[in-house]
Structures are given as structure tokens and as C-alpha cells.
Image (cartoon, rainbow, N blue to C red):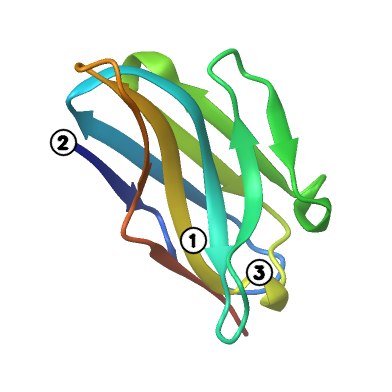
Amino acid sequence: QVQLVESGGGLVQPGGSLRLSCVASGSIFIIYDMGWYRQAPGKQRELVASITRDGITNDADSVKGRFTISRDNAKNTVYLQMNSLKPEDTAVYYCYARVMVFSKREYDYWGQGTQVTVSS
């Protein structure tokens, strides 16, 4: 019904930057919260940042001042600008969205994940 497609991951050196994008498509009536989680090998998935439809953000302490989440409601897209990347930011990054579909039911949807590797 709803698909989330991420892009923008890759390999970057410490101190570098990447910008992740996630586009939602399908039977979307309205998208509420959007955001990013990440999962490193051997660790649990953790919240990186989230943003409400009105633009209120919530960032994990580990990324405050380095990562910025934003969204374009007209394009059903959420972004994650990642600056000053560290090796410990290496993980698979997953986009999510809380969506009301045309049936007026709400569901959480996830993207397939995009790998971010920070290494010299």
C-alpha cells in the first residue's frame, strides 16, 4: 500500500557529510511523523531523529549538533543531513513514516535501509 525508498547512503571518511533521502509513495492520505532509525552490527535499532508534520524535531543525543532532519510534505519526503560523521555512526539507516491511508487507518511503514559506513 505504501512504499518508502531511501537513498544517499555510502562510504565516507570521518568528518565528512552525507545526505539521506526517503520518499513515500502509494495509498497515502496523510503522513504524520517521519524519521530515521539506525542499526549497527550487534546492536539494537535506535532512533536517530524524528520530525512531525508541523516540523517539530527530536534528535538523539549522540547526533545533536551534527545531524539535521527535515521534510517536504508536498513531496512526501524526509531528509537527514549528516555532518561531522564519526566511525560510530556506521550503521544501516532506516526511514519510517506514520501514515493514514485512504481507508483512514494508520500504519507505520519502514524503508529497506541504506548502509552508511564511516571509515578512513
Question: On the rendered structure, is 98 left or right of 85?
Answer: left
Corner quadrant of residue 101: top left
Q: Secondary structure at mark 1?
A: strand
Q: In the image, which is nearer the foreground, mark 3 or mark 2? A: 2
- Image quarter in which the C terminus is found: bottom right
Query: Do the residues under discs 3 and 1 have CB atoms within 8 angstroms?
Result: no
The answer for how far apart the CA atoms under marks 3 and 1 are is 10 Å
Residue type, mark 3 in image: Asp
- Is residue 11 visible from the viewing direction of this image? no
Residue type, mark 2 in image: Gln
> What label does residue 89 carry, if any?
3
Q: Tell me which numbered mark, 1 or 2, is placed earlier along the sequence.
A: 2
Residue type, mark 1 in image: Tyr
Q: What residue lies at 29% left-to-right and 34% top-to-bottom? A: 24
- Image quarter in which the N terminus is found: top left
Q: Tell me which numbered mark, 3 or 2, is placed earlier along the sequence.
A: 2
Q: What residue lies at 80% left-to-right and 58% top-to-bottom? A: 62
Label 1 sits on residue: 93
Query: Do the residues under discs 1 and 2 have CB atoms within 8 angstroms?
Result: no
Question: On the rendered structure, is 32 left or right of 17?
Answer: left
Label 2 sits on residue: 1
